[in-house]
Amino acid sequence: MASNGYRLDSELSGNWLFKLAAPQAFFPVAGKMIPWFATLAMLFALPGLYVSFFVAPTDFQQGEAYRVIFLHVPAAWMSMFLYLVMAFWAALGLILNTRLSGMMASAVAPTGAMFTFLALWSGALWGKPTWGTWWVWDARLTSELILLFLYFGFIALTNAIDDPRRADRAGAVLAIVGVVNIPIIYFSVKWWNTLHQGASVSLTRAPSMAKTMLIGMLLMALAAWMYSIAVALWRVRAIILERERDAQWVRELRGVE
Amino acid sequence: MLGGLKSIIVRDLRLSMRRRGDILNHLVFFVIVVTLFPLGVGAEPNLLRSMAPGIVWVAALLAAMLSLQRMFAADHADGSLEQMLISAHPLGVIVVGKIVAHWLLSGLPVTLLAPVVGVQFDLSQQALVVLTVSLLVGTPVLSLIGGVGAALTLGVRGGGVLLALLVLPLFIPVLIFGAGGVTEAQAGMSASPHLSLLGAFLAMSCVVAPWATSAALRVAYD
Amino acid sequence: MNWGSFGNFIHMGGYAFYVWGSYLMGVVCIAGELVLLARRSRLAERKA
């Protein structure tokens, strides 16, 4: 056990997967993976955008305004999925006491928050032409807003604590509590919304889905997913360098001596 | 174990009794926040009556939050928390004791004051009863969840506001069903589904929160 | 989906503000994230 409480990399012996759990080993691997995922992101985004704008037909009720869903829905999906990913890495770090897991959680968080914001922004821009107001206290949008608060909380907490180990572990406890609460929050907000909605329609009820619309959303979602992985890998590399700056291998990398 | 629990509660209560002003300030804050809303939205009785459940509940939330830092901060500052962690007492007992003490000093007084405040909004008797019961069941949940936040932000800079940021979103389900129940009662309908759900939240947080708070305390001290 | 003309495409059936407002924000967010990350990365690689 190293003096900072983390397992020495040499103690995680054998299994290549465990070897990869060492930041020093993961750093170059992550670097090699980034271009692949970036390329995949483009390979999904280009046909996705093409389908969204040139294949999917005009909607009967909402006209061209509905095309916002090809951005809004994938962003919303990613915002929720990335929170789960973040909580997963955080929990793993807490259980296995590995540095890299905590770093991955911190690497994912800003992208998750970005997608949450994008979902809210595009939701507002979708709501105005279709339902007349910039904001609707719809169950999904309200839950999305609360999710943004949860992301901000995680980021604020981990940034406020100077010791990276304590920051990671505190963030992990928070992320786990958050993950447990998200279904409860969603259920509560949904209930609250139906009470006050009455006969009005949910903002996020998409137009009756032509198959092409579904394909467009799926392609954009896959693009967002690949993008998120590429960005998370890039960010975790920066975090590794920041945290491990005193390590020999980092000093050699920078040519500091 | 129960003896240990009682001793922690008594200790926290005794320490707080020395600074009786804190509890009073807490209640005054609650009343001030409640009073702000009519001043902000106008004194139209029907409007106020419909808003009252939300107003009282939000004020209770904010008041609970303000006093949360007190749960661990003083003991952390003078080192007695560290002593407790090393001591033979199981951490869970210490945590539960502190949460109970916190509730007795913040949630319970607010619950007792709520009917008085509710009368200001011309709530019906039925609604007042539901308001009080909902706060009775709901404020312990605030103390439980808040304890996790207090432990996570122990000694962290920007603590108070950060604590609020962390903990308020988690309070939202309690707010929704607490205030929602009172609204139902106002409409003459049964609030038992809401109160049952609050009870379920209480049960759930009794299980989850002490674990999370203990984990957070260990994180802070390791 | 035949737009007829580039002008029609941009016009988006009158909903240009909402549709392009969303997608432009998407571009801003992604570009912003990438720029900030590049800066962070460069700083991390350089700082001694």
Image (cartoon, grey):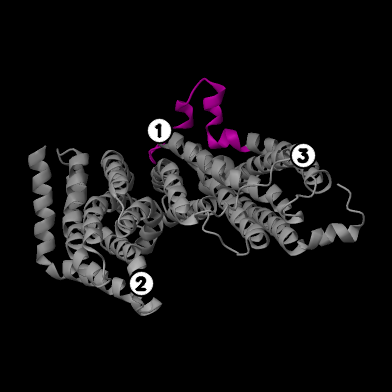
* Disc 2: host chain: B
Determine which residue is flagged by label 3: A212
Q: Give neighbour class at mark 1: few <14, some 14-19, many 20+ (Cα, 10 Å).
A: few
Is residue A93 left or right of B19 when viewed as pictured? Answer: right
Determine which residue is flagged by label 2: B46
Determine which residue is flagged by label 1: A95
**What stretch of residues is rendered in magenta?**
A1-27
- Residue A62 percent location from the top left of the image: 72, 54
For marks 2 and 1, give the CA distance.
54 Å
* Disc 3: host chain: A
Residue type at mark 2: give it. Asn
For marks 2 and 3, give the CA distance.
50 Å
Residue type at mark 1: give it. Ile
* Disc 1: host chain: A
Disc 2 and disc 3 on one polypeptide chain:
no
Based on the displayed image, in which of its 4 quarters is residue B122 positioned? bottom left
**Does residue B192 show up magenta in the picture?**
no
Residue depth check, mark 2 versus mark 3: number of the one nearer the observer: 2
Residue type at mark 3: give it. Thr
